Image: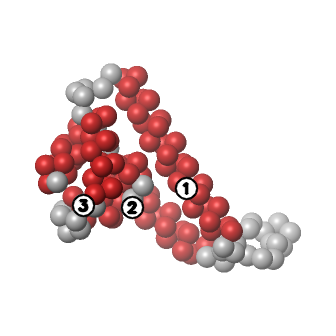
Amino acid sequence: MSDLIERAEMVRRRLRLRQAVIAAVLNISQGHYSKVVARRTPLARNLAERLAAWVDVNSTGEHADGDLVTHRMAMLAESIQRQCVELLQLTTHGIHASASPADGEPFQPKAASNLEKTRKAADGER
């Protein structure tokens, strides 16, 4: 398993991708990916399978520019989909204010401070 983690990190660095990008592709948090790489958290079998598949697809040598663009587009699409699901869950669970904002005032969710913290943390990963 540690060989898989080392190979994944080599490929990630070669492609100049942040841990958050790989984590999004693997459908885990960046923090969890970091803990797995640092060997503070064991690599679960299903995650190992997804990671091995990602390494196999991306370790075929240097990507041509078109391949890299296609790869990046696929990763961005997955990230956007995940964020849309999260947004839907937040709105469905009543995070937003039940009353409409006063005329001329922007809509402010009740949990705006938590959303802002999450947004700032995500910007810090970039």
The residue type indicated by label 3 comes to Leu
Identified at 43% across, 65% down, the residue is 121
Asked if residue 124 shows in the view, the reply is no
Dot 2 or dot 3, earlier in sequence: 2
Across the whole image, how many numbered discs are drawn on residues? 3
Percent x, y of residue 91 = 68, 67
Label 2 to label 1: alpha-carbon separation? 12 Å
Q: Which mark is drawn over residue 43? A: 3
The residue type indicated by label 1 comes to Gln
- Please say if 106 is above or below 26: below
The residue type indicated by label 2 comes to Ser
Front-most of residues 42 and 12: 42
Q: Residues within 10 Å of mark 2 (few under 14, many from 20)?
A: some
Asked if residue 122 shows in the view, the reply is yes
Quarter that holds the N terminus: bottom left
Front-most of residues 120 and 8: 8
Seen in the image, is 34 located left or right of residue 80?
left
Q: Residues within 10 Å of mark 1 (few under 14, many from 20)?
A: few
Label 3 to label 1: alpha-carbon separation? 24 Å
Q: Which residue lies most toward the left here?
A: 3
Q: Which residue is mark 1?
A: 83
Local secondary structure at mark 3:
loop
Identified at 61% across, 61% down, the residue is 87
Identified at 38% across, 25% down, the residue is 67
Q: Which residue is mark 2?
A: 29
Front-most of residues 113 and 80: 80
Quadrant of the image occupied by residue 28: bottom left
Q: Which mark is drawn over residue 28? A: none
Q: Please state which of the two labelled residues, at mark 3 or mark 1, is closer to the viewer.
A: 3
Percent x, y of residue 97 = 73, 76
